Amino acid sequence: MPLLQLILVAVIQGITEFLPVSSSGHLILFPALTGFDDQGQLIDVAVHVGTLGAVVLYFWRDVKLGLDGLPRLLRGHVDTPGARLALGLIIATIPVVLVGAALHFTGLSDAMRSVKVIGWTMLIFGFVLYIADQKGGRDKKADNWNLRDALLMGLWQAISLIPGTSRSGITITGARWLGYGRQDTARLSMLMSIPTIVASAMLLGTEAAMNADIAALRDGALAAAFAFVSALLALTLMMRLLTHISFTPYVIYRAILGVALLMYAYGA
């Protein structure tokens, strides 16, 4: 794969994975609108692994807390913050894993990869995010995340399997409806991405890696590295900006892109 394409795909994924603008939608649009060949499943998995590294590093304190609580959870005890966080992440991941597996093995996931679908989801779920952000409360804290809210956010996350929805965007939307503040919603959304990306990489990555040659694996490693750097920068910037601004700028971006994509798709 040309180095320029590799870098562009990695940077697009890195920047958009944690912003509520849909990384998967942008990855689908990139070859459709530029004329580049589709980057393929291996590169898609590689750039997701790169963004996984970024979120683990940025939220290492929370990640360590959950990992420390996992052994206690496996012994049937949910009496520590770490065990509760680990259980919450597991519960929040179950819906997207079940729905994702169903879409993958039925072929419906490929059927939804179109400019029209992404255009509509950009508009619709951008509007839903705006309403949730404006109307949602700010009383709940991420440290007090409960299992009911984890399940509800997990159900919201399953909707993100529709291209253009945005995994971070839809989980942030769900958290804002539940009454979490902006920084807390972003924190929970990013933590939820960790087991979700791991599950996706396990589902898609094994087959892709087994069928890849040395050159493809090298491209994947480069893509992961570029995605890691760009994701870490984007994540750091977004978390800092949320102390001063709302999610409205991302909604405006989604609306402009959605309209442009629908005009393109319908030949206007």
Image: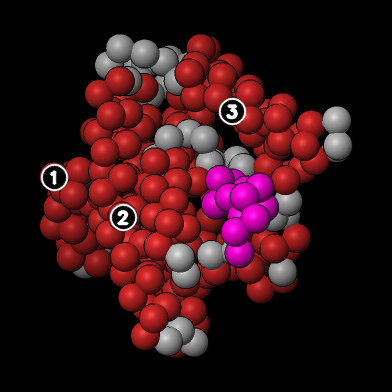
Residue drawn at x 66%, y 73% is 105
Numbered disc in front, either 2 or 1: 2
Residue drawn at x 71%, y 35% is 261
Question: What amino acid type should be assigned to the residue bearing mark 1?
Answer: Arg
Label of residue 104 in the image: none
In this view, the residue farthest toward the right is 267
Mark 1 vs 3, N-terminal side:
1
Q: Which residue is mark 3?
A: 254
Residue drawn at x 48%, y 34% is 20
User: Does the rendering let one see residue 158?
Assistant: no
Depth check: 154 or 204 in front? 204
- Quarter of the figure that contains the C terminus: top right
- Residue 44: x and y in percent read 48, 63
What is the CA distance from the residue labelled 1 to the residue labelled 3? 32 Å
Question: What amino acid type should be assigned to the residue bearing mark 2?
Answer: Phe
Is label 2 in contact with label 1 (beta carbons under 8 Å)? no
Depth check: 40 or 36 in front? 36
User: Does the rendering let one see residue 234?
Assistant: yes
- Residue 216: x and y in percent read 42, 78
Is label 1 in contact with label 3 (beta carbons under 8 Å)? no
Mark 2 vs 3, N-terminal side:
2
Q: Which residue is mark 1?
A: 61
Q: Which residue is mark 2?
A: 226
Question: What amino acid type should be assigned to the residue bearing mark 3?
Answer: Arg
